[in-house]
Amino acid sequence: DPKVEDYVVNEVLLVFKSFEDELSKAEEEAKRREEEEKRREEEEKKRIEEEEKKRQEDQQKQSYENIVPEDK
């Protein structure tokens, strides 16, 4: 029967379309998570660099203060 055949074909196409949609969503989510992780890693790297820079500045300041004592 052509009507049954059309129905079955449409149902199969719907299943494939649904699968493709879910796969696309999963890929987009994986990409979003990867980008978020990369952003977090970059922020952490920047934070560590800033802490290191501040530590070096404090160390330089301390060295300078040890070399040139303040007048009292």
Image (spheres, rainbow, N blue to C red):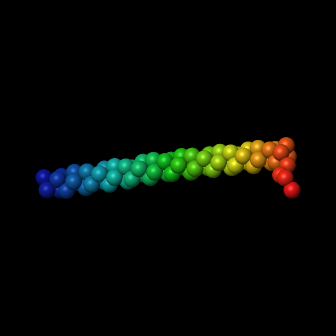
Quadrant of res 72: bottom right
Q: Can residue 19 be seen in this view?
A: no
Q: Is residue 50 visible?
A: yes
From this viewpoint, which residue is outermost toward the left?
A: 2
* Image spot of residue 33 (x, y percent): 50, 51
Q: Residue at x 34, y 49 (%)?
A: 20
**Quadrant, the N terminus:** bottom left
Quadrant of res 15: bottom left
* Image spot of residue 43 (x, y percent): 58, 50
**In this orientation, which residue lies closer to the viewer: 40 or 29?**
40
Numbered circles on residues, count: 0
**In this orientation, which residue lies closer to the viewer: 30 or 5?**
30
**In this orientation, which residue lies closer to the viewer: 57 or 27?**
57
Q: Residue at x 17, y 53 (%)?
A: 6
* Image spot of residue 52 (x, y percent): 70, 46
Q: In this view, does 34 lie to the left or right of 1?
A: right
In the rendered view, would you say 34 is above or below 4? Answer: above
